[in-house]
Image: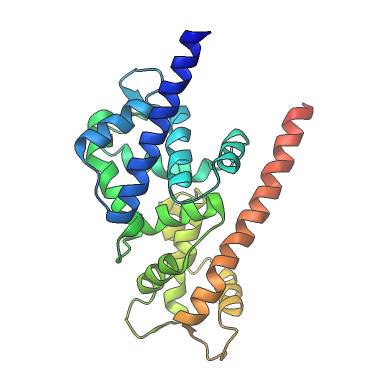
Amino acid sequence: VIQSHHHDIANDGKVRSALISLKSALEDGVLSKQECEELFKRYDKDNSGTIERAEIQQMVGDIMVAKGQDKKEVDEMLELGGFQSFEQQLFKYFDKGDKDGKIDQEEFVARFPSYVSTLIKKEVTTEAAILTLSSALADGSLDEKTCKQLFKRYDKDGSGSIERPEIKDIIGDLLKAKGQDPKEVDELLGMGGFVHYEQQLFKIFDTGDKDGKIDEAEFIAKFPGYVAAIVKKDGGANAEKKQEERKD
């Protein structure tokens, strides 16, 4: 019993250490190689030398908690499989080297600091935007700072507003964040396959002056609620699916 108690204390210490490292990194964007190696050991549960798909859940959970989400709620969501799209996006991001469906230590150490920096950096690349939205679609939250960063990405011409042609990027990023095949999404966008979706988004966002443009204030006011609505809708569908699976 004493041995088990010491083991639990050691595990709790490792969890706290991992969360402290991530919280600190989300503030200053800095993660040392040693910290990355320690985090890798935490996520490589079976000590196989690689992080497999099933093990990435722990990483997702730590990121959510480090961003301020309640740990108990995050653990419950992980148990229900509520972060699958985010897990898929993270795997695509990290498994860039040999693309063997596993993340080895070299890939993790090389990519994790840049991933953390995408969470706090001011300019949002396509890859960073998709990861940011995957995270938001996992926990239903988007703060004002993140919305401002995303707005800059979608306001391509720097005019201070998102016009109709520019809204395609929002749709593309959201679909990719939800796990749609990026190539198929890009092809459909090129063919004008989401015109109805574009029209609906404009109605949702351009509710202030209704000038046919989405300014920053409108985007910040509406986008978090829109994302939360997607999470609520998908969450209900996932819950129903889980109940059906349990019945079977």
Which residue is pictured at 26% across the width and 49% down the height? 114
Write down the quadrant of residue 120 in the picture: bottom left
Whole-percent x, y for residue 89 in the image: 42, 45
Query: How many numbered discs?
Result: 0
- Image quarter where the C terminus lies is top right
Q: Is 38 above or below relative to 199? A: above
Q: Is residue 31 left or right of residue 221?
A: left
Q: Is 84 above or below relative to 148? A: above
Which residue is pictured at 29% across the width and 42% down the height? 112
Whole-percent x, y for residue 17 in the image: 36, 35
Which residue is pictured at 40% across the width and 28% down the height? 13
Q: Is 146 above or below relative to 35? A: below
Write down the quadrant of residue 7 in the picture: top left
Q: Is 243 above or below relative to 196? A: above
Q: Is residue 54 left or right of residue 228?
A: left
Q: How is the image coloured?
A: rainbow
Q: Is residue 167 left or right of residue 124?
A: right
Q: Which is more toward the observer, 160 or 12?
A: 12
Write down the quadrant of residue 148 in the picture: bottom left
In the image as oriented, which residue stretches furthest toward the front? 2
Whole-percent x, y for residue 241 in the image: 71, 39
Q: Which is more toward the observer, 169 or 150?
A: 150
Which residue is pictured at 49% across the width and 12% down the height? 4
Whole-percent x, y for residue 81 in the image: 59, 37
